[in-house]
Image (spheres, coloured by chain):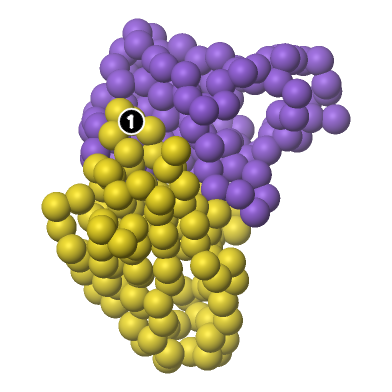
Chain colours: A purple, B yellow
Amino acid sequence: DGGITQSPKYLFRKEGQNVTLSCEQNLNHDAMYWYRQDPGQGLRLIYYSQIVNDFQKGDIAEGYSVSREKKESFPLTVTSAQKNPTAFYLCASSFGRGYEQYFGPGTRLTVT
Amino acid sequence: KQEVTQIPAALSVPEGENLVLNCSFTDSAIYNLQWFRQDPGKGLTSLLLIQSSQREQTSGRLNASLDKSSGRSTLYIAASQPGDSATYLCAVDTGGFKTIFGAGTRLFVKA
């Protein structure tokens, strides 16, 4: 079955700790994205990657970091510098610019 | 700066009704527009993608239209069913891999 997987589904962390969210796709897509969703708001782009070993900041990259060492994988690290990290995080992928985006099931991160 | 607005924020209709969801955007220079469905606590499911050169797309009971000059798109759902209850989001691709999302319309179809 082709698709995007995100793990874990729920994640709880204490303030001041870094945490890494996993995103894997087997759709052979070149582009991958990370979004953040807060209640009552649209999705906001954190980072995107057009191709392996390349990634660009989105609109709200501060306090986050990513890597793209493999085509299939695009992990997101939420650092202690992110002031309000509690949110629903969604990973997506596409064949490239202008193509349909496909989303994973999301990870709900709660930081206390 | 591109902004995407969806009105109403919530909508409740009886089963069987035909309905229209609205999406407006401020900058007509778009690459494409995509409609998604999101169930509570889940990821987004792509419904329809309209390229900037197209006027509409259809899939089953869904029809999406695009009018770039007026900065509007509509999603028409025919013969609504309780299973259609979800949040519907529109997203505008401005080119360069950046997509701007609306906040969504929460739809409830009553049996």
Residue B106 locus on image (x, y percent): 56, 67
Residue B72 locus on image (x, y percent): 34, 62
Tell me if residue B105 comes above or below residue A44 in the rendering. Answer: below
Residue occupied by mark 1: B97
Identity of the residue drawn at 40% across and 51% down: B26
Q: Is residue B1 visible?
A: yes
A10, B55: nearer the viewer: B55
Tell me if residue B101 comes above or below residue B19 in the rendering. Answer: above
Query: Which amino acid, by three-letter code, is at mark 1?
Result: Phe
Residue at the extreme left of the image, as rendered: B53
Give the image quarter of residue B61: bottom left
Q: In the structure shown, which secondary structural element does the residue marked by tag 1 occupy? A: loop
B92, A106: nearer the viewer: B92
Identity of the residue drawn at 56% across and 77% down: B11
Q: Is residue A29 visible?
A: no
Give the image quarter of residue A40: bottom right
A2 vs B9, left or right, is: left
B30, A61: nearer the viewer: B30
Identity of the residue drawn at 81% across and 15% down: A16
Identity of the residue drawn at 55% across and 48% down: A42
Tell me the subunit letter for badge 1: B
Tell me if residue A3 comes above or below residue B73 in the rendering. Answer: above
CA neighbours of label 1 inside 10 A, class few (<14), some (14 to 19), many (20+): many
